[in-house]
Image (tube, helix red, strand yellow):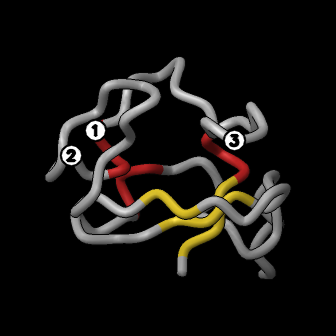
Amino acid sequence: MSEQPRAGFEGSYLGDRARLPAEARLECKICWWVYDPAEGDAQWQIPQGVPFVDLPAHWRCPQCDCAADQFMVL
């Protein structure tokens, strides 16, 4: 039996934040801005050390407003 393909952006973490390690860096598929947990996100007032998995549900790319589930794992 074959598996059904999962919905989501090909190459991303498919919106399942639980699949990401704490140190994962992710890149916006629209503008290529990188979320690095070591740096956090000054625009959204996310301090250094906050993993992508712990970002607020309403968080979006600070450069282009792309949804978090459209980010790609680097």
Q: Is residue 55 above or below residue 69?
A: above
Q: Nearer the viewer, mark 3 or mark 1?
A: 3
| Residue 18 horizontal side relative to residue 47, left or right | right
Instruction: Classify residue 62 by image quadrant.
Output: top right
Percent coordinates x, y for residue 54 in the rendering = 28, 38
Rate crowding at label 3 as few (under 14), some (14 to 19) or many (20 or more) other CA atoms within 10 Å: few
Q: Earlier in the sequence, mark 3 or mark 1?
A: 1
Instruction: Classify residue 24 by image quadrant.
Output: bottom left
Q: Secondary structure at mark 3?
A: loop
| Residue annotated with mark 2 | 50
Spatial separation of the CA atoms under disc 3 and disc 2 = 19 Å
Q: Is residue 45 above or below residue 42?
A: above
Using the image as rendered, state which of residue 52 and residue 11 is in the foreground: 52
Instruction: Classify residue 10 by image quadrant.
Output: bottom right
Q: Residue at x 70, y 35 (%)?
A: 67
Q: Secondary structure at mark 2?
A: loop
Rate crowding at label 1 as few (under 14), some (14 to 19) or many (20 or more) other CA atoms within 10 Å: few
